[in-house]
Image: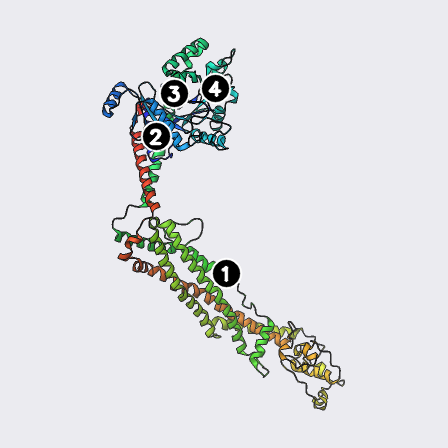
Amino acid sequence: MEPLIPVINKLQDVFNTVGADIIQLPQIVVVGTQSSGKSSVLESLVGRDILPRGTGIVTRRPLILQLVHIDPEDRRKTSEENAIEGEEWGKFLHTKNKIYTDFEEIRSEIEAETDRISGNNKGVSDESIHLKIFSPHVVNLTLVDLPGITKLPVGDQPVDIEFQIKELIIKYISNPNSIILAVTAANTDLATSEALKVARDVDPDGRRTLAVVTKLDLMDAGTDAMDILMGRVIPVKLGIIGVVNRSQLDINQRKCVADAIRDEYAFLQKKYPSLTNRNGTKYLARTLNRLLMHHIRDCLPELKTRINVLSAQYQSLLNSYGEPVDDKNSTLLQLITKFAAEYCHTIEGTAKYIETTELCGGARICYIFHETFGRTLESVDPLGGLSTIDVLTAIRNATGPRPALFVPEVSFELLVKRQVKRLEEPSLRCVELVHEEMQRIIQHCSNYSTQELLRFPKLHDAIVEVVTALLRKRLPVTNEMVHNLVAIELAYINTKHPDFADACGLMNNNIEEQRRNRMRDLPSAVPRDKSLRGPDGQSPSPTELFPEGQVTKVVAGGSQSGQNVSEQTDSGMGNWRGMLKKGEEFAAGDRPAALYPLPAMQQKGYAVNLLDVPVPVSRKLSAREQRDCEVIERLIKSYFLIVRKNIQDSVPKAVMHFLVNHVKDSLQSELVGQLYKAALLDDLLTESEDMAQRRNEAADMLKALQKASQVIAEIRETHMW
């Protein structure tokens, strides 16, 4: 399994070049509090002094450290090819191919790069530094050194420095493919270890947590770490390994790592003889190497699948961005044709991208016609805004100065036109709604159907402008046609319409039947003209009714004194008999008080203004008036329903013909005529900078994924076991 770790290192290099963390690679993340000895552990694994050292916070940026073991032959070959002196060297990602053989120079470069991003006064950054060390004295490992957990800000650190560092640590250790190396000093209580606490938060089962106890030589006299190292205090599933670090004095005196490892071995032999072979820096390196190899082996199948899925996604994304334009003429014509086709398909319901969240295109137009417009027309009351008094007034106005024996036809025609006119407003509103939906289809096609248009914002704007202008041009024509449809119905009231004739015949039969029922319900003991007979049972003569030639004047609105004729009810008798009866009462001198007061101006002696005579809001109608009004109302309702049916059928047809179908048929020719011009080619097919950048990024990422797939494909099954 030894070749697996270099494979992961190669993958890390591949994805580092594109600066993306879309693949979570297996690696070892070192976590611990500030000054717990994390950097010392790493230096012990490397075997050289490469990391900045000191008191306080020293590691202020994540350091991704790749240790690459090289054989002597490979080392000689590489040294000859690259003119490298020495058996160990290092390379930074940010310095490209520059090779460092002096490890002091590597440390200086880390300090300089840290100060460049994080400042020189204790600032912290989450931007990582990538360092690769080649040496025959290391095992293959990939480690991440993170800033130590701290509590209080110092220097230029923000007040929420503790939160920022914890967020940075969690970002790395929450990767399920990482191994957590929790570093804790032996001279502190393990139960208070911040590193173990943070590790347990993201890895509650402890399947990928390894504990390292540092500074075994600094424990108080009379105490030891036997219980801690045996896992009796806090058990850790992958184990607890103790190490002895170099002190700050050893570092200042330039004590080499090899001497420190020998001293560590001697200390463990003396203090913990039974645990010597399971502790120390060398055992830690072998354990980390073994854990990482097994972890990579377990993660590799999922990693391979993830890379293949991402490759397909980025290939599709790159295809949607399109290739750079070579032939502008054909590209422009192709885009125009595709947009026009998608627009028509959306109306017809055959578009490639079907909307599932809401009605769109032709379905929305159908909904407007049959749900919105249809229900609106059905909700219009045939007699809405028309009271019985309005009907009666229209009947009287249509008769002129002559009393009518029959209901005048002119009154019906005037009233039914007034009601039919009310259908015009919802019809025009239907046109407006369809026009709005045709506008929305433009945006729908731009977003879902023709992704290529997003590459060329000027072409997209020009297409929207042309289609909008076409729709705007057709709107007055369609409105005029709808207005004419209503005007046609108003122009000729066809009382010979078959449906209307049937309704009239049925209505006359009903009225005749109601009249017979009323006659049948009259009391048989009371003669119908009893009130007009004298005491001797004889009818009075006209001279008795109107003594001294007095004539009672009756007008359409009431008597000479403002008395309304409609109040002269005759309890089933004809109007003429009622008028005779009232005249008889007036002749007897029993004239009642006026039912309606005179206008104020008339009471005060001013000239009478006939417009000020009050019109009663409601009054009891005579039998004939009720019958006449009922006849007119029924006729209006019957004819209105016929017209409404015609309008409900003809308006959608007119809208489809003059607006929808016309736009569908002429859209492509309009777009070609307006946009397919040599002078506009370069301007319309100018790509947005954002689109070009995204295409380049997608292409780079696709190359990286393809290279990563090749790297993984090189692994043989024999390497896995």
**Viewer-closest of 539 and 60:** 60
**Viewer-closest of 337 and 684:** 684
Residue 176 sits above or below residue 654 on the image: above
Question: Amino acid under label 1?
Answer: Arg
Q: Are marks 1 and 4 in contact (CB under 8 Å)?
A: no
Give whichever of discs 1 and 4 has the lower sequence position.
4
Question: Amino acid under label 4?
Answer: Ala
Please identify the quadrant where the N terminus is shown.
top left
**Residue of label 2:** 12
**Residue of label 1:** 375
In front: mark 1 or mark 3?
Answer: 3
Q: CA distance from mark 1 to mark 3?
A: 81 Å
Q: CA distance from mark 1 to mark 4?
A: 79 Å
In front: mark 1 or mark 4?
Answer: 4
Crowdedness near tag 1: few (<14), some (14–19) or many (≥20) residues, C-alpha within 10 Å: few
Q: Is disc 1 placed on a helix, strand or loop? A: helix
Residue 146 locus on image (x, y percent): 42, 27
Please say whether residue 511 is visible from this viewpoint: no
**Residue of label 4:** 185
Q: CA distance from mark 3 to mark 4?
A: 16 Å
* Colouring rule applied to residues: rainbow
Question: Amino acid under label 3?
Answer: Glu
Q: Is residue 503 left or right of residue 525?
A: left
**Residue of label 3:** 43
Give whichever of discs 2 and 4 has the lower sequence position.
2
